[in-house]
Amino acid sequence: MSHNSSANPVVEAKSLSFRYGSRDAVNIDSFQLDAGESLAVIGPSGCGKTTLLHLLAGLLKPAAGSIEFLGRDITSMGGAQLDRFRGQYIGMVFQRLFLMPALTVRQNVELAQQLARQPRDNGRIDALLQQLDLVELSHRKPRMLSQGQAQRVAIARALVHRPALVLADEPTSALDEQHADQALALLKEAAAEVDAALLVVTHDTRLTGRLDRELEMRTPT
């Protein structure tokens, strides 16, 4: 699919690089993701896919280059400002899910709404729990969930505050066929519903051709 650059990208990176010690992990001349667009980032292990995701989330600072998010340069933001910005505008599904062990499934999802400084929207929470087959698990703590169930909770948490950008790192890796289809469909639907950009880092061949375009990363030489 051809990609027409828009005047209002959600995220735009230029001359982006990141190194681990002396090793280049990411080297990208230009990168843009528009509102309502979905992108699969593919490539072999060690090619920098997750590093790119962490850079775009503001969890890592690039060695060089700029990342503009909704027209604001996140590389120049301080920690507290960046935390607030991320809580408000970005939804994330990590490989390590980081669910709060002391909270129930429902409370984990509610927390993301609070961090985005939004009033509690029980209807939104109920709808996501329903769509992800989590209603009967809503009072369980994370330790009582299977890996696949926990992954679905992380997806609900990433979507509940209607973020402008959804970043998902291997979101279907622990899911069976049915739940992988369900999770991807929901990620796409929920992003489309609020015109959010969706970026999925994946090894999962079941996702091939299911997003608007693909970015293939290669291991830096």
Image (cartoon, rainbow, N blue to C red):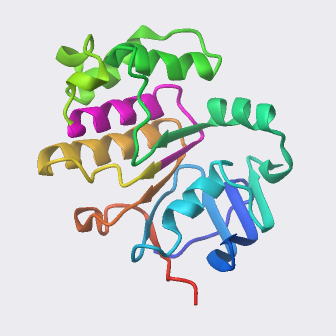
Q: Please say whether residue 188 is one of the residues in the magenta stretch.
A: no
Does residue 125 lie above or below 219 as drawn?
above
**To which quarter of the image does residue 209 belong?**
bottom left
Quarter of the N terminus within the rendering: bottom left
Q: Is residue 86 left or right of residue 198?
A: right
Does residue 91 lie above or below 88 as drawn?
below
Q: Is residue 154 left or right of residue 27?
A: left
Choose between 5 and 126: the one closer to the eye: 126
Q: Residue at point 40% right, 38% down?
A: 97
Choose between 74 and 8: the one closer to the eye: 74
Does residue 136 lie above or below 173 as drawn?
above
Q: Residue at point 50% right, 66% down?
A: 49
As drawn, the residue found furthest toward the bottom would be 221
> Residue 169: x, y in percent?
43, 53
Secondary structure mostly seen in magenta is helix
> Residue 71: x, y in percent?
80, 49
> Residue 131: x, y in percent?
26, 28
**To which quarter of the image does residue 206 belong?**
bottom left
Q: Is residue 68 left or right of residue 167?
A: right
Read off the magenta span.
147-167
Q: Residue at point 68% right, 61% down?
A: 6
Q: Residue at point 38% right, 46% down?
A: 188
